[in-house]
Amino acid sequence: MTVRESIVFNGDLGSGKSTVSVEIAKRLGLRRVSVGDLYRQMAQERQMTALQLNLHAELDQAVDGYVDQLQRDIAASGERLVMDSRLAWHFFTHALKVHMITEPAEAARRVLARPSGPAESYTSLEEAKIKLKERSESERGRFIVRYGVDKALLRNYDLICDTTRATPEQVIQHIVDVYEGSLGADVLGEAPPLLLLDPARVYPTEDVTTLRGLWNSEFVGDVAEAGDEGLTPLTIGYTGEYFFVVDGHRRLSAALQSGFPLVPARLVGEVDEPVVGGMSAVDYFAAQARPSVIHDWAVAHGIELPLPEHALFGGDAVLAGDPGAGA
């Protein structure tokens, strides 16, 4: 992949977009523009919170109209820059489009810990989680109605990066490597997006007891020595909420054993798209990611994987290691 003209960032609130985009702009010597800062300034001028401005923007198109025209003008100028905006991917054509994600509770902790202003302040972790979700859903609905685009679809982007456990420096270096073409060029050239996922947040779809070679010390050692950027990308499905392995359980296990905060992957299907045998991502995950499969994988690797809704209320309710109904 050749070096792109610009880098545009969007993603979850609290995912670290500002921290990462500021440093990348410095490292690459590019100007940075933050639409989030502009919205916060507009909210403060109107004596509103950020959420209130979002809800107001659903009724008043002038709010988005002003910011949209600004982004169109910048994109048309041809200036090579770093853009921190939740809709820049829609306006910029020749740019590396980066979507940053993080676990919701971690996002709330980060937002709660940073200095608050009149446009954005929370009194508790739970309030932060609720308000962040409301803001995100408000934006998503507004973008669907106003622009006909769904910001939640991963195929809008070139790169998805999970910042839950990775340090800012690790995230920055991976994004710069992608931008400069030394990481993920094959995936981006064939079928973007490239996924950089937290291996501790990826769900298995096969029983850990039937998978061979997971604890092969030579293979795990080779993976650890090569580092996460040397790992052959996993094949991943996405339900719209959960990432799961379609192919690559052994590599995922080695990444977990090696303590990697990120693993490269390619997306085979999301939500209603087929992943295996014509089954959609949602249906395949519901059929394969049974409670016992999730539980055994998590215990074997010393991680916590919350049971998704289908597993909580499905028929495979007895976890491995737990007494059965007739015990």
Image (cartoon, rainbow, N blue to C red):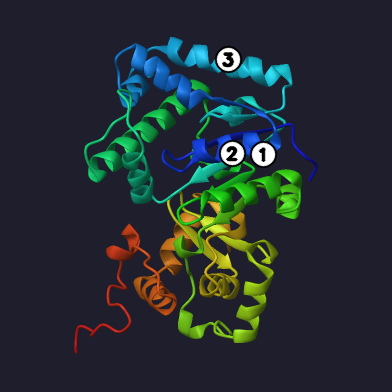
Coordinates of residue 230 in the picture (x, y in percent): 70, 65
Task: Please give the residue where the numbered disc 1 appears in the rendered image.
Answer: 27
Please state which amino acid type lies under the numbered disc 3.
Leu
Total marks placed: 3
Is any part of residue 273 visible from this angle?
no
User: Badge 1: how crowded within 10 Å, few (<14), some, or many (20+)?
Assistant: few
Cβ–Cβ below 8 Å for labels 2 and 1? yes
Between circles 3 and 2, the one closer to the viewer is 2
- The residue at 66%/73% (across/down) is 225
Coordinates of residue 294 in the picture (x, y in percent): 40, 71
User: Badge 3: how crowded within 10 Å, few (<14), some, or many (20+)?
Assistant: few
Please state which amino acid type lies under the numbered disc 1.
Arg
- The residue at 35%/71% (across/down) is 291
| Sequence-earlier tag: 3 or 2 | 2
Helix, strand or loop for disc 3: helix
Would residue 99 be found to the left or right of residue 178 on screen? left
- The furthest residue to the right: 2
Is any part of residue 259 visible from this angle?
yes
Image quarter of residue 267: bottom right
Coordinates of residue 141 in the picture (x, y in percent): 41, 29
Task: Please give the residue where the numbered disc 3 appears in the rendered image.
Answer: 70
User: Is 11 placed above or below 301 here?
Assistant: above
Image quarter of residue 145: top left
| Sequence-earlier tag: 1 or 3 | 1
User: Badge 2: how crowded within 10 Å, few (<14), some, or many (20+)?
Assistant: some
User: Is 24 placed above or below 292 here?
Assistant: above
Task: Please give the residue where the numbered disc 2 appears in the rendered image.
Answer: 23
Would residue 77 be found to the left or right of residue 160 on screen? right
